[in-house]
Amino acid sequence: MNFEIKYKDARGRVGTLKTPHGIIKTPALMPVIHPGKQTLPVSDYGAEVVITNAYLIYKNEELREKALNDGVHELIDFTGPIVTDSGSFQLSEYGDVQVTNEEIVKFQEMIGTDIGTSLDIPTPPSVKRERAEKELIITLKRAKEALEVREELMLNSVVQGSTFPDLRSECAQKLGKMDFQVHPIGAVVPLMESYRYQELVEVVMASVSHLPDSRPRHLMGAGHPMIFALAVAMGCDLFDSAAYILYAEDDRLLMPNGTLKLENLYEMPCSCEVCTSYTPEELRQMEKEKRTELLAIHNLRMSFAEMRLIRQAIVDGSLWELVEQRCRAHPFLLEALRSLKNYSLDLEKYDPPYKKSAFFYTGPESLNRPEVYRHLKRMERISPSQKLILLPRSGKPYSERLYDLPQTFYKVVDNDSSAVAGTGSSRIPQEDMQVAVVDVPFGIIPLELDQVYPLAQNESPADYDEDSIKMVKNALRDYIKGFKEIIISAEVARKFALEQVLSLEDYSFQESLKIDVDDHKRIIMIADYQFGSGAGEGLFNEEVKIVKSRKTRKIRHVYDGDELIATLRASDGVFVLAKEGARRLHRYLPYPKNRVVVNEDAEPFAREGKSIFAKFVINCDIDIHAKEEVLIVNEQDQLLAFGKSILNGKEILNFNTGQAVKTRKGGL
Ligand code: GUN
Ligand code: ZN
């Protein structure tokens, strides 16, 4: 395998792809090089990999001879990795090509392509199902044939299936079982040309969710920077741009927020060498050829800058914020962004639960982010109490900022307490009370969780919008079902229009309300939230010793006597296990929960505390997220070591190269 993931955010990956002519950083943009016509030195502007068309070379006698004699790298004068397409695009444009699948695959191998492509059938969107099915059979047959005739060549295998999500999924699944190195998603150009972005989301999500996570995906023909962030967030790793030259020929400038026409420009829009050296008027007066070249340089600069920004956003954990910004550039992109809520379950599994960046609420679409979905789900892990008190938002962390407690309260009458909220059967009502803050976008936040990521590490405007109010109102109505007595501050009731859905009567506390978060309750609740219902009891019994930071007064360590159980990480407020914590969690959580199972060969390395490579993993908990605390065990479920996952459960099982777990300690 040639692909490795280094950083993750949303469904996006920052990784490396190894090819015979070098390693490239992904997500990557591959400028399209027209063989024989290319003049622009694209590597000067940031290209690490390019794509050209093997069919155009094959068809032209002069180009073919040169490619066969000197290789494709010499032909197009590029020393890095070269991907070639097969002529399928010409097939879709002109209905016919003069080459067979076998011939074009062999030809690509002969000219020294790094990654070649079989002759798939790009079935356009919205065709009759019968046609899509028929053409898909041919695409799959040709993919298989390509595997039989290639020798060393790395191979693309294009996912087709028109706009039928189930056909896309079926195709992806079948191709994924075969030995391909990269999976393009094909026939999406017509969707992008007509701004059908919501259907693009459907096609891409149906494909990526059934492709192996261990191979890069190439969104074929996507060259406009305004689509890059969204596509990367859905799990696309490679893009090709003919747009940089096509738009330049048409006097148009690519921007991450859309396209600008040179004829309309009063100012040049960016700080690239073209935009800072020429005025719009100078460019307009220039002869066509020179102007096209300069605009192509701007277009390349802009496109590579966007790709760098996206990679950095993944490293920072701020890709969603970038996607939300970009998708506001066009109403149909916004529509596409909104449609991602249909994929919450899938996106939640890939999105890392802990990030370096705070969660920024940038509009109602932020309510659909995996972090919100995950919090609502994880709240089912928290045992309800006898009594619930709901307070309005304050500064964060809430428990330290509630100095201006509200004065007026309501009590909920006729709450349906027979229906216990959530599905977790282990929810046992406790005798005490739970105090929670109600806020956007996360809804209900018990004070014990007020330092856990992202409940403390988020910002949202104080004037709630209608969508947020509706979402929180619904979440609240579900949540309170498990409680016997519910007291709501009048401010919360007013802000979230609760009198519409609850019967409320005036309430006053006997004595003034004092908020005091119990340390032991706090560590139990954080552990339940982090590891699952009951994990708090499994990790921390009554006798544990809690050590706080002298400076911040926040909980830092939890000990059993002199033995460290776990440390509460200051940056995101969750537990990092120590040896004793790993032992206790292992005892408490049933197999295979939070486990990564390694084979015999890896056992001694794990015991020594060496990191775990994916190829040694024989099983694991499929629900593990990236960046979670995991237990490393052998096939007999003996605890060997523990550490932090780099990938999620599905990815760990799928990968054969690279690290799966960064081990903290072995020798257990
Ligand atoms: N270029 C743009 N779309 C496609 C496609 O569907 N298949 C191939 N092979 N190339 C493309
Ligand atoms: Zn510019």
Image: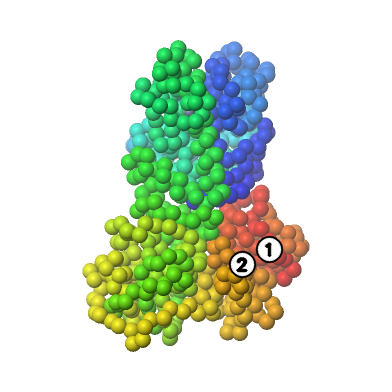
Residue occupying the point 63% across, 24% down: 78
Residue receiving disc 1:
664
The three-letter amino acid code for the residue at tag 1 is Arg
Name the one closer to the observer, 622 or 145: 622
Residue 137 appears left or right of 557: left
Q: Name the element at disc 2.
A: strand
Residue 555 pos. (x, y %): 57, 73
> Is residue 212 visible to the viewer in this orientation of the structure?
no
In the picture, the quarter occupied by the N terminus is top right
| Vertical comparison of 36 with 190: above or below | above
Name the one closer to the observer, 291 or 352: 291
> Is residue 38 visible to the viewer in this orientation of the structure?
yes
Residue 570: name its quadrant.
bottom right
Residue 406: name its quadrant.
bottom left
The three-letter amino acid code for the residue at tag 2 is Val
| Vertical comparison of 132 with 4: above or below | above
Residue 339 pos. (x, y %): 36, 49
Residue 203 pos. (x, y %): 42, 43
| Vertical comparison of 665 with 121: above or below | below
Give the mark nearest the N terminus, 2 or 1.
2
Residue occupying the point 39% across, 30% down: 259
Q: Dot 2, crowdedness within 10 Å: few (<14), some or many (≥20)?
A: some
Q: Is disc 2's CB within 8 Å of ligand 2?
A: no
Using the image, tell me which numbered label, if any, was put on residue 27. Answer: none
Residue 16: name its quadrant.
top right
Residue receiving disc 2:
576
Residue occupying the point 43% across, 57% down: 459
